[in-house]
Amino acid sequence: MKAAIRVLLASPRGFCAGVVRAIETVNLTIKSQGAPVYVLHEIVHNKHVISELEGQGARFVKHLSEIPSGEICIFSAHGVSVETEEQARQLGLRTIDATCPLVTSIHQMVEKYHDQGFDVIIIGHHGHPEVVGTAGRVNGRVHIVASKAEAEHLQVATPEKTAYVTQTTLSQDDVAGIKSILEHRFPGIKGPVKSNICYATQNRQNAVTYLAKECDLILVVGSKNSSNSNRLRDVAKKSGGTSHLIDDRDDIDPSWLEGIAKVGITAGASAPERLVEGVLDWLDEHAEVVEVTEMKGKEERISFKPAVLTDT
């Protein structure tokens, strides 16, 4: 006999405005310019989205040198460095900048602080495309700090003139401890008036915190290389919930349902809703789902226009 479970869906979940913009940019470019259209790095971090776009004619590359001269190159939602922009021009590529506007605002903040003579600290993960791109907006006096230990040992050229920004896909807990150390070490450090953590990231973290208090098991739909999806799993665990990050229904282990009465489901900002529907189908096949409800969450009304081609 199948175990009876209830399901609670997070709200909001799934695609954010920046991801929608990036995907629409690729789709519209393919329709208007024809395939192939080249994209530097993954447009967003979700293997299903990447696979679908490849099927339509997108070609994802790791290096600009892989793109023939004269072809279109789309920069991903995570943003790129000034050096990358210049290299694209030198290679004769036609570029479209699909950087999330919220990331672009952080680029502008970094450039402003740097122009004013500040050492700029980026709180974020080493090697993440967003952090690499943000650090590459300026030349020198920029530092990446990923942990409290790194914050403790950071050396800057001008301790009395420091500023910080953060990666948009972190959690408040990720930032709080590091920020506290930086404020202690560099009194008067400047930073954003409002958190750099993306509104969509924060909304999804708030929703999963609620799920963790209400449910026995949390399933976070999102790819393993998605920072915001990983943070959702971490936030759920810190809130006391048993949580697993899954790419899709095929990642679910039936043993996870043992002794479970209520399952919460959310999705990272780059995960399509159809993957959530697939998880619901899987649960229906493996358990007696007696109820599926959606929590009351914050409605997101922000939208961005797709990026367009610029001559280089």
Image: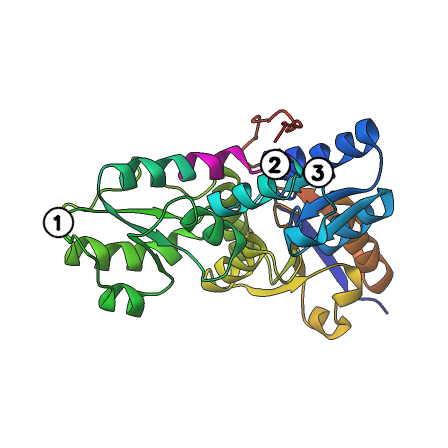
Rendered view: 33 above or below 99: above
Give the quadrant of the N terminus. bottom right
Residue 147 falls within the magenta-colored stretch: no
Q: Is residue 182 left or right of residue 249?
A: left
User: Residue drawn 48% across and 48% down?
Assistant: 133
Numbered label attached to residue 23: 3
Residue 80 visible? The answer is yes
Label 1, residues with CA under 10 Å away: few <14, some 14-19, many ≥20: some
Q: Is residue 99 magenta?
A: yes
- The magenta segment is 95-106
Q: Is residue 256 above or below residue 60?
A: below
CA neighbours of label 2 inside 10 A, class few (<14), some (14 to 19), many (20+): many
Q: Residues within 10 Å of mark 3 (few under 14, many from 20)?
A: many
Q: Amino acid at mark 2?
A: Ala
Identify the mark nearer the N-term, 2 or 3.
3
Q: Which residue is mark 2?
A: 98
Residue at the image position 27 percent from the left and 54 percent from the top: 179
Label 3: element kind: helix
Give the alpha-carbon distance from disc 2 to disc 3, as whole Å: 9 Å
- The image quarter in which residue 107 lies: top left
Q: Disc 1 marks which amino acid? A: Glu
Please provide percent x and percent y for residue 270.
65, 47
